Amino acid sequence: MDSKVAVIGGTGVEMVGEAIGIDTPFGWVEAKDGEVAGDGLLFIPRHGEVHLPPHRVNYRALLWAAKAWGARRVISTNTVGSMSWHPVGSYVIPDDFVDFTKSRASTFFEEEAVHVDLTAPYCPEVRRVLVDGAKAASGLVSGGVYVCTEGPHLESPAQIRMLRRFGDVVGMTGYPEVVLARELELCYASICIVTNPAAGMRKDSMSAAEITAEMERSSGLLMEIIAAAASKIPEERGCSCGRALAEARL
Ligand code: HPA
């Protein structure tokens, strides 16, 4: 049965459920055990109770916990700045990514040569239900390339002029989750909320408070989209995410 879903919730996202702790080889993960439409749903707050900054998040523990709990599908939420035309408050369901992080543990295979295929880095089945759900809820939804920076500082205008050649939206938390999920043969897709135009794409400066405020405005609808999407994911997996390791070893 592949129907159990984990949600890795970013800034400003909350879900109800029984508080549980999951032990992993990478550390302890606090989560909430809930359900949607009769199926299990695990909510994992990415930043934990103390709100760890993006470069300190224990990404391996989060993905490991999702799998250990029984999830085979993972939906993640991320805030992003737009490096293109996206209105604030709109949704981007990335179809590809570029990594500009610097210091993050980004594999479960430290000793072994394992090279997972990332031709389709985000699960097409989970993407589809998120795109449909976001369209039905708001209409303002697109695909695009997610560029992940290390943070914790926001970017400079020159950095954004460079990064916009590589992708559409910029955030700090989408990588390495996407590749770690693939290494665990989990289906993974992200729903990004555009909280601001990226640095230099408007006249005034910006603030972290502005990102949080936009996220708070959007989080109710976002959770409704996720709950509806989770209940529509096909019971059995028709994608190839579950076979990611079959030909990945040298
Ligand atoms: N840059 C990086 N991360 C972000 C941004 C941004 O402009 N907005 C929300 N998360």
Image: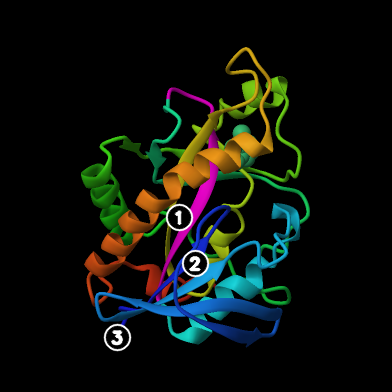
Q: What's the distance in space between the residues labelled 3 and 2, CA to CA?
A: 18 Å
x and y percentages locating residue 20 in the rendered image? 56, 85
Cβ–Cβ below 8 Å for labels 3 and 2?
A: no
Q: Is residue 225 above or below residue 182?
A: above
First to last magenta residue range: 72-85
Q: Nearer the viewer, residue 99 or 169?
A: 169
Q: Amino acid at mark 1?
A: Pro
**Numbered-mark total:** 3
Q: Amino acid at mark 2?
A: Arg
Depth check, mark 3 against mark 2: the one in front is: 3
Tag 2: Cα neighbours inside 10 Å, few (<14), some, or many (≥20)? many
Residue 109 as seen in the image, left or right of residue 119: right
Tag 1: Cα neighbours inside 10 Å, few (<14), some, or many (≥20)? many
Quick one: label 2 or label 1, which is nearer the N terminus? 1
Quick one: label 3 or label 2, which is nearer the N terminus? 3
Q: How is the image coloured?
A: rainbow
Q: Amino acid at mark 3?
A: Met
Q: Main secondary structure of the magenta part?
A: strand
Q: Which residue is tagged 2?
A: 182
Q: What's the distance in space between the residues labelled 2 and 1, CA to CA?
A: 8 Å
Residue name at image x 55 percent, y 76 percent:
31
**Is residue 79 part of the magenta span, yes or no?**
yes
Q: Which residue is tagged 3?
A: 1
What label sits on residue 159 in the rendered view? none
Q: Which residue is tagged 1?
A: 121
Quick one: label 1 or label 3, which is nearer the N terminus? 3
Observer able to see residue 147: no
State the quadrant of the C terminus: bottom right
Cβ–Cβ below 8 Å for labels 1 and 3?
A: no
